[in-house]
Amino acid sequence: MTTTTVAGTPLAENALTRDLLADVGSIDTAAPAFGGTHAWLGRPIFNRPALLEADTAASLGRDLRVFLDVLRSLPDRLFDGEPAALARALGLPEAQAAASDVSARELPSIGRADLVQDAAGFRLVEFNTSSSLGGCEIAEMNRAMLADPAFAVFAARHDLTYRDPIAGMLRTYPPSAHPIAVLTWPGGSHDHLTLFLAALAAAGHEAFACRAGELAYQGGVLTAGGRRVDRVFRTFQLGRLDGSPEADALVRPLLRAADDGAATLLAPFAADLYGIKECLALLAEDACRQALTADEREVVDRLLPWTRRLDRGLLDHAREHREELLLKPSTGYAGRGITAGWMVDPTTWNERLEAALSAPHVVQRRVRPVAERFLDADGRAVPCLLSWGVFLTDGDYGGAFVKGIPGAGQDIRFLGDGSYVGCVFHRKAR
């Protein structure tokens, strides 16, 4: 990795990336091969992929497996083996705590880490551990990139490959003669599942979309819209279980079937616990650190920036270090509800800290990312700060995507719908 500065922005690119910029430059993402990607994403696409060396991809897989194992060990190490006790300690309502105990030991080794690369390496700022892993269809973009003749030659010359996150997830699914029910919460359309369902079909798995209200469980058989199923891919979060009679009725057939062993939840609700940001903060607390091995502490300390649960005793520190901190709700996604201290004035920061005391929040130290270059329409190199989404599937590196806005400063708002998105290739191991 070579680090330089472009227009005042720290730049770090590996040899593969420098060769790609020199030999290929950019790829025409308006080509027909990208039609499926555009229909799925509905946002701009980077005109080249991000590239990883083989050892970097392998190292990410090992580190993320250790990190996820540590998170999932929290009930055993701190809560007498009860995921529901962890849920209650995180302030979740009883309906969510109870659901967390169903099939809690049947968690596949899958997740998506949100990473930022600084001068020292990758830092983990969030970990999505539920079954609903946004961006898992990214291999569609990898395939489109390989349809470009110049990039295809470059990829072959440099032994580049990619991992398909959906294929990796499918390897963790039990075999069955019945289709997979892709379960959504009532309301809205299923249009966003088109590419996901097509990927399942291409891999030989019959699947269909349905809503939670279409489930029924009787005589040891779970049905969805009248069709028998024994594998359910859940696309909604644990937070939907708000304890209301309506929500309880929607998930009761699913929880009963899973508890009886008549259906496999992909993934069980307990998986969602470990993506709650307060779990990251728990890793810094003495009780947890003392329970970790030296090797586990090394991985946690290297990956995780300073992260703490917000309480009144932390307010003075948070006020003093505003420009180096982010305030994050403990649950949530896509940057929603996050305040970056360097993007607001002290008065606004203090007001948001005070307001955050009424619900679980964490404060996390800012990671100052390095940039990579992308070519604009005129062929000029523009630095871009990247956010990496790296998948762990079947306990190994499972593919990745990147987000960012060329030429923009560090901003957490592009984590939602305003960013460019790119796929990732890595060199084959030798």
Image: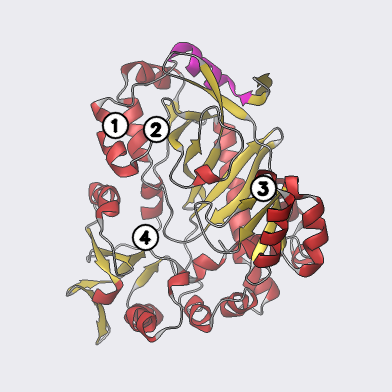
Split into 4 quadrants, where in the image is the N terminus?
top right
Residue 13 is covered by the magenta coloring: yes
Q: Which residue is mark 3?
A: 344
Residue type at the position of mark 2: Ile
Q: How far, Cα to Cα, is label 1 from label 2?
A: 9 Å
Residue type at the position of mark 4: Tyr
Q: Residue at 75% of width from left, 50% of height from top?
A: 322
> Badges 1 and 2: C-beta atoms under 8 Å apart?
yes
Q: Which residue is mark 4?
A: 173
Which of discs 1 and 4 lies nearer the camera? The answer is 1
Could you tell me which secondary element the residue under label 1 belongs to?
helix
Looking at the image, tell me whether mark 3 or mark 4 is earlier in sequence order.
4
The extreme front residue here reads 347
* Horizontal arrangement in the rendering, residue 261 relative to residue 409 (left or right): left
338 and 180: which is toward the camera: 338
Q: Which residue is mark 1?
A: 34
Q: Which residue is mark 2?
A: 45
Q: Is residue 266 above or below residue 40?
A: below
Q: Where is residue 384 drawn, in percent x and y?
A: 55, 29
* Horizontal arrangement in the rendering, residue 206 relative to residue 146 (left or right): left
